[in-house]
Amino acid sequence: MKRTFTLVLTLVLLMGIVHSPVSAQEEISGEKTWTYDNSLLVTVNVAEEKTFTPEDFPEVEVEELYVFGKSATDTGYSYDILLVIDVTVGWYYMTMAENSLKQNPSVVNIERNRFANDYEIKESSIKLNMNEVYLTVGSSVELFLKDATIKSNVTTSAGIMLKPKDGIVMDNDYLSSYGLYLLNADDGYYKATISFADYLPVEDYVYMMNTLYALDIIESAYMLEEEYPIHYYENWENKNSDIINTFTYGGIEYYNEYGDLEVLYQSTRITGVSVGTAILKIDHCGFYDICVIHVGDRGDVTGDGKVTSLDAAMILRYDAGLEAFDDLAIAAADYDGDGVVTSLDAALVLRYDAGL
Ligand SMILES: [Ca+2]
Ligand SMILES: [Ca+2]
């Protein structure tokens, strides 16, 4: 080992400045903010040309209507129509409106949120813990959703179905002490609504369910999903599986036994597969964030695809403060993966180079 170091030190002193390390790749800002959800894009097939008004969609509260597209079909015309919905009656109304429109025989497609940016009624953001990661082939890192803020200025509500244990009778006074409003009771099942101060308050929902489950009079309680389409899982999109592997696990946030909110958002373990740059996207209810993952070869700080004594020399120079590395070169330089770049890493690179 001593001879190795002497050799490398000699190399370092002789070489002075060698190849510059891999240059930093493009920077992509991670934080995204969207406004949300007061529009539906509806495709309507009709036999003849016509001018549409909100009265053509009596099943929903349409505030404004815009025709975005029109095309001739074999049987008449197809229109793309943007319906701006009055959401002050409650966010859940969007789901009801969508469901109602599905019953309309001339409506062939409904798309949500597409033009939400134009109408600043609601605002949301979703953030990953990291937006740029430097890995080497075979090494891994954890990525998770750090924050999901969903804002709104309207009160929203959701339906809950309850079934108390035999002999227990609930009334509205009883339920209202838990923030619930009784809609109806039938055959031992109670349908109630819960109101929230914010749109998609997953924590409020989980807290309510935790509270209900903790009451020993409750046999079952569940959210009526058709009225409140909670997305339990984020969607991770890896289009560069040749560069990185992803393994996803986890759930949503919840209240623990002390009443503190704990975040159980999904995590993804990313492992470098081959040298290159990958983009991982996390999508939650239409909001998304991305992380750019740079993968280098372990030991190859020069980025030339080979692990040689030159790389070892560079690592020693870096360790001695004679060289500046970019983040990918630093990841590559940490040959033993202990999180720091030291002369030991240089020695290991030399051993590799020597076939030891
Ligand atoms: Ca190299
Ligand atoms: Ca190291």
Image (cartoon, grey):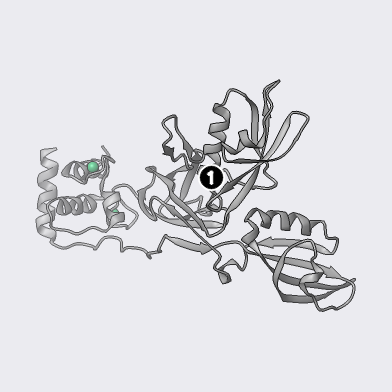
Q: Is residue 101 visible?
A: yes
Q: Is residue 277 visible?
A: no
Q: Residue at x 22, y 43 (%)?
A: 345
SS class of the residue under badge 1? helix
The x and y percentages for residue 295 are 38, 52
In the depicted view, which residue is nearer to us: 283 or 125? Answer: 125
- Horizontal side of residue 271 vs 310, given as left or right: right
Q: Residue at x 14, y 42 (%)?
A: 4
The x and y percentages for residue 339 are 26, 43
Q: Quadrant of the C terminus?
A: top left
Q: Amino acid at mark 1?
A: Val
- When asked about the image quadrant of residue 346, the answer is top left
Whether residue 72 is situated above or below residue 61 in the rendered picture? below
Q: How many marks?
A: 1
Tell me the residue that label 1 is attached to. 202
The x and y percentages for residue 261 are 43, 39
Q: Quadrant of the N terminus?
A: top left
The x and y percentages for residue 213 are 57, 29
Label 1 Cα neighbours within 10 Å, binned few <14 / some 14-19 / many ≥20: some
- Horizontal side of residue 309 vs 262, given as left or right: left
Whether residue 97 is situated above or below residue 216 in the rendered picture? below
- Horizontal side of residue 76 vs 266, given as left or right: right
